[in-house]
Image: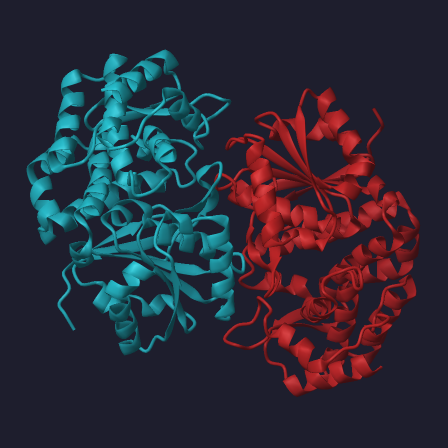
Chain colours: A cyan, B red
Amino acid sequence: MMMTNSETLRVDLNDRSYDIIVGANLIPNAGEHIPQFVKRDPAIIVTDVNVAELHLENIVKSLQEANITSKTILLPAGENTKSYEGFCELLNDILDTGIERRSCLIALGGGVIGDITGFAASVLLRGIDFIQIPTTLLAQVDSSVGGKTGINTQHGKNLVGSFYQPRLVLADTTVLDTLPRRELLAGYSEIVKYGLLGDRPFFEWLEENGHSLIEGDEELRRKAIVTSCSAKASIVAQDEKESGSRALLNLGHTFGHALEAETGFGDKLLHGEAVSIGMTMAFDLSARMGLCSTEDAARVRKHLNVVGLPVDPTNIAGQSWKCDALLSHMAKDKKVRDGKMTFILPRGIGDSFITSDVDLALVEAMLDDAIAA
Amino acid sequence: MMMTNSETLRVDLNDRSYDIIVGANLIPNAGEHIPQFVKRDPAIIVTDVNVAELHLENIVKSLQEANITSKTILLPAGENTKSYEGFCELLNDILDTGIERRSCLIALGGGVIGDITGFAASVLLRGIDFIQIPTTLLAQVDSSVGGKTGINTQHGKNLVGSFYQPRLVLADTTVLDTLPRRELLAGYSEIVKYGLLGDRPFFEWLEENGHSLIEGDEELRRKAIVTSCSAKASIVAQDEKESGSRALLNLGHTFGHALEAETGFGDKLLHGEAVSIGMTMAFDLSARMGLCSTEDAARVRKHLNVVGLPVDPTNIAGQSWKCDALLSHMAKDKKVRDGKMTFILPRGIGDSFITSDVDLALVEAMLDDAIAA
């Protein structure tokens, strides 16, 4: 057995509280952490074909050593799996294994796998347990914390889903070495978000250490993931069902989702990349409204750009944009209330707030400039 | 406006508590009770074609008088609507109306409409409000209380769903006059269940008053519905997620579901009819095990039979039964734990308990006798 070097973070949600364990080599040592949560054999591992190739054998072997049998359900890789069809097929595949109420699902993969598996766990037999083993940086710092699950419909992303907490999250920093650099950067974008929305010193630490972290420093990665997860966990603990302050986590996401919708939620623009552009836009809009300094807006844009993330829609080759189309996507956002769009805007780096008091003419002007840039 | 004569029952579930209002003419006066729960126009009414013909105009008009606009989604009548396809279509239809998080669904109909609409409410935008207006006796005393929602899959009934509470239940006793007698009786079967599982005096009251209640006495109906709902509400309050005592509510249901599965969940055998046979079987099995007196078992069988409910599988014309098939359905029940079936068995009328300590040979013998009878 390999040595593990890990840190544990508790997400405090009463009877739905759970631990996030962050560290090296957690997957090949899964059998140390998981057995207490598998009240009934076999554990059902849901993963995608790409992740399976890299990590499935390791986890299955470690579970076997801990006397846990498992069955695996392989899904196609990619966002298209998060459809009605993909979801109903997954439910049937899981039911085929003969689950009971005490059965446990293990989501092994990125955000797509976590979202669809968590949603399946929430509705199978009206709710069974699940464990998240996020294998992308994005999933480790974002989708594996906070219990949002869901699938996409023709009307938009994640419009159908549930709030449902995992029993345990294992964030294995070693698996990040197998990620394509572009995906690693997309995850890094969400890490930057935590600095921007509420923790200026963390943003400054990222300006200092972001490069080494991306290049592979395991200690720095662990610190960034733990800091991000604990920022998210503390916001989620205050507002599990997103009736208020949790919306802060959507900094950059209203714009980002609109950009993703236009590019078809695919490889052309990854979620984290869209969030990078979206955060740049939020700072730009805020500066135009006189809420935040142009210096801070420029500093955000610079850091994202320096590490290699896109900051302008025009960075996306071969994509043309229309302001109207983007606005129309934004109007369909889940945060719309009485027809008014909600924005997460910064007063500066490390200080964001929620408002629906925004002059849409300024939003249009900002978008027009951004897509013409 | 017509006079209403109603009683209100509170289901106590912390921040998910809600009222059940039981009384005459509640639908044509819906506008008196609903507006506070519709935080955003329009209210989305989900109903089926049969119910719409009888009651839709009344509710829409009453809402209009209370300045609430509404949109209606019409589903086909019948259990087949509770499929993956029916569910995904409903989600799309609701999303088409442009809902937001503060939107509210109104389920106007029987158990199918309540189950599928409640499930839709629980997953749309990760959870929006809904109101239950059950139009069958069965739905009024059973499916509208307790927050179980769900759809059927090829593996069984209600295997996919959620625990999700409505904001309000309006049980209009006047609409029961429009029910076919067979459906009324099917609902009465669940009323008898509450007497059998925990309230002997109520069962005796039903022996006395069941006939007049079925024939249309509004006062007796209200009393029976309120007694049933409050029995269920108090069990649900103790065990919302069915980890223990809530399973008592399944008296007669393990057998009943197996019978329904064999008849295809259709008109051949209504749910309440299956429960009537299932309760008779539970008392028969219990008497064979020496747990309950043969007198009580005979008395239950007699009352159900006297009011016109089926008590033997052989009462179902043109259906042949196989013991193995029934047992195999029972083995797939959601209450199965570590492969052991759970039974709700009576010690006598008004005193039931949960056990998995049952000799399957006795179950087989009872079933063999029942299907040969």
Residue B19: x and y, percent?
66, 40
User: Which residue is depicted at the point 43% across and 30% down?
Assistant: A335
Residue B314 falls in image quadrant: bottom right
In the displayed structure, does residue A176 sit left or right of residue A110? left
Tally of numbered discs: 0
**Is residue B36 visible to the viewer in this orientation of the structure?**
yes
Query: Split into 4 quadrants, where in the image is the N terminus of chain A?
Result: bottom left
Q: Which residue lies furthest to the front in this view?
A: A318
Residue A52: x and y, percent?
30, 64
User: Which residue is depicted at the point 57% across and 55% down?
Assistant: B238
User: Which residue is depicted at the point 35% across and 42% down?
Assistant: A237
Q: Against A80, is B350 above or below? A: below
Query: Split into 4 quadrants, where in the image is the C terminus of chain A?
Result: top left
Residue B156 falls in image quadrant: bottom right
Q: Against A73, is B227 above or below? A: above
Task: Return the residue nearer the eye: B151 or B96.
Answer: B96
User: Which residue is depicted at the point 20% across and 53% down?
Assistant: A179
Task: Return the residue nearer the eye: A77 or B103.
Answer: A77
In the displayed structure, does residue A85 sit left or right of residue A71? right
Residue B109: x and y, percent?
73, 44
Task: Return the residue nearer the eye: A106 or B202.
Answer: A106
Residue A187: x and y, percent?
23, 44
Q: Against B28, is A118 above or below? A: below
**Is residue A122 visible to the viewer in this orientation of the structure?**
no
